Image (cartoon, rainbow, N blue to C red):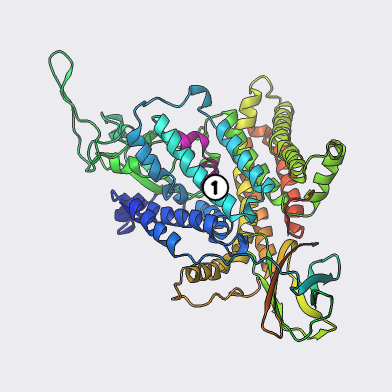
Amino acid sequence: MIDVLRLPLIGRILKHRRGRLALQVPFLLIALLLIYDGFTGTPLAAQNLATIVPWVHFRGFAILVLLLAGNLFCMGCPFTLPRTLAKRLSLSGRRFPRLLRGKWLSIGALLLLFFLYEWLDLWASPALTAWVIVAYFAASFVLEAAFSESAFCKYVCPLGAFNFVYSTAAPTRIGVHDADVCKSCVGRECLNGSYSPQPIILIDQIGVDGAPTKAHIHNKTGVPGCGTLLFAPQIQSNLDCTLCLDCVRACPHDNVGLFTRAPGAELTQPDAWHKRYDLSFLIIGLAFMGLLNAFGMIPPVYALMSDLIDALGLRALGWSGLALEGIALLTIFAGGGVVLPALLTFSAASAARALTRTTHRDSLRAALTAFAPAFVPIGAGFWLAHYSFHLWIGFFTIVPAFQAFLLDHRIGILGQPNWLLGGEPNLTLVGLLQTLALLGGFIGSLSVASRIALRLYRRGSFLGLLPWALLLLALMLVGLWVFGQPMEMRGALFD
Amino acid sequence: MPTLLTLLLLLTLVGCREPAPPTPTPAPDAPRLRLAVDPDPAAVGDAALLITLTTFDGQPIDGAQITVRGDMNHAGMQPVLSGGAESENGVYRVPFRWTMGGDWIVTITAVLPDGRQIVKTVDLAVRS
């Protein structure tokens, strides 16, 4: 294992006190530029940076970088900059409500974002996209001002939840060099924060009555501890790690590092993840939403929506096309993103328990949550196939859009925009790459599931694997069908 | 500080952006432009845009310079550019290619022989 932070140059840059800021500031400038162009630029999505950058480039690069390097987008997240300000303004210091401390809010936020994306055609509206970015800044600021931990990142942010899930397949993870150093660590600065930006230990002086006579309090020169409350020596997974590297900077023993590992190593590691329904359904749900999101872009979805509206008798109500479309989409999302994943995975877990005769040994929750990691590779395959399609065919569209933006401001240094830059994309090659992504994801999932089955059921592993393998196969076949359809980007149908 | 500088920079840009030209109210005697597609309904593949230019009282206008730009309403798709067609009886047949199914926004610009310019935007659904 290599500690990336001990590599020359890159390690120094990442560990530098302003290392994260160096990544965040460019992202912040881009976010502000997108808000500005979204509100003031052309309403044509194909020519506006506010729609091109997030829906074409950000999404495509995000999934690629997550799989190839790690959660660099959370590391560079600009929404956490006003969060830092909010933290300083915060007086309450209360923790996030216990009942909400799980992934259910994240799951709800993801469903809401995907639903709004389809319903309001966010991809076609620079202004609405700009509002989404503004809402992100506002939500991050408010939650951070109200609560002590990074509640927005850990419990709410849908993008963060997406990044957390697929960074579990990344080839890097935070860890410690020597666990014994952590056992004897008094301050646990990786969690609690350091008083100083330098790796030194400052100890409060306690008087004879037990009260401190000299206390070291956190100040502007200090380094915060982990915002999502992860304790470095106990980290087994990238889940909840925003890769902010605060733990690395805060550690007075220079014992925390960013280590390389086999991609997706934690997916087959026992006890790397909590056996919780919320966490499992975040992962499983994201795989299904990967299919749903792509399904929303192909012609059969319009026939299904129309059939649903007829079946529910909604046309007779005389509602607007937007309302009808909203109800149809909501039904599809509730069915395909909530009911179907729950039904199919509970069925698979029940079948596996029955086939392996472990009904009395394993609870249904244990049987289901154990296989949740198997949905990471196939989900990543769906998202990669979808987002890389947009990135591939629209890669160069940002160039003329930026040239046009500059010309709008009487800046001609980049010349006139060439809207046909890059030529026509090779759709056959794109289709081949999409198929490879789907097959790669399926094979990865099958491999993870078989190792989990072997661990859980030993001699009965084949029977324990069978229901899950069939479910994964069905998902992959549906994926091949969806991505084999011609793409058709349409807005509201029923106006 | 960087945030403050950025905000100041953006404020400057807001001041710099060229205001969009006001949408002109068509005069009663303004020329008329109509668009039809062939095949109809539009489907992915080669097609033709039939652009009809007439005076307000229905007389055909020939000899105009036509340019057409088709954008998908989704970001990240290359536009389709075309134009330069000859006319017959005020009808200009512009070769076009729908590169993907979905919603398209077709912007037609016609420069009339007398120098006047007409710009019309038409939303179209294209079948895949």
Of residues A258 and A155, the one drawn nearer to the viewer in this rendering: A155
> Is residue A169 at all visible to an observer of this figure?
no
Reply yes or no: does residue A334 show up in magenta. Answer: no
Taking A478 as reference, is A275 above or below it? above
Q: Position of residue A120 (x, y in %)?
A: 66, 47
Q: Position of residue A187 (x, y in %)?
A: 26, 30
Taking A263 as reference, is A454 above or below it? above
Q: Chain of mark 1?
A: A
- At a point 31% along the width and 32% down the height, the residue shown is A192
Reply yes or no: does residue A153 show up in magenta. Answer: yes
Q: Secondary structure at mark 1?
A: helix
Q: Is residue A356 left or right of residue A36?
A: right
- At a point 55% along the width and 67% down the height, the residue shown is A401
Quarter where residue A162 is shown: top right
View extreme (front): residue:
B28
Quarter where residue A390 is shown: bottom right
Q: Is residue B18 left or right of residue A299?
A: left
- At a point 73% along the width and 69% down the height, the residue shown is B99
Q: Position of residue B27 (x, y in %)?
A: 71, 69
- Which residue is labeled 1 in the image? A131
The amino acid pointed to by label 1 is: Trp
Per the rendered image, the range of residues in magenta is A150-169
> Is residue A175 at all visible to an observer of this figure?
yes
Of residues A296 and A316, the one drawn nearer to the viewer in this rendering: A316
Of residues A479 and A264, the one drawn nearer to the viewer in this rendering: A479
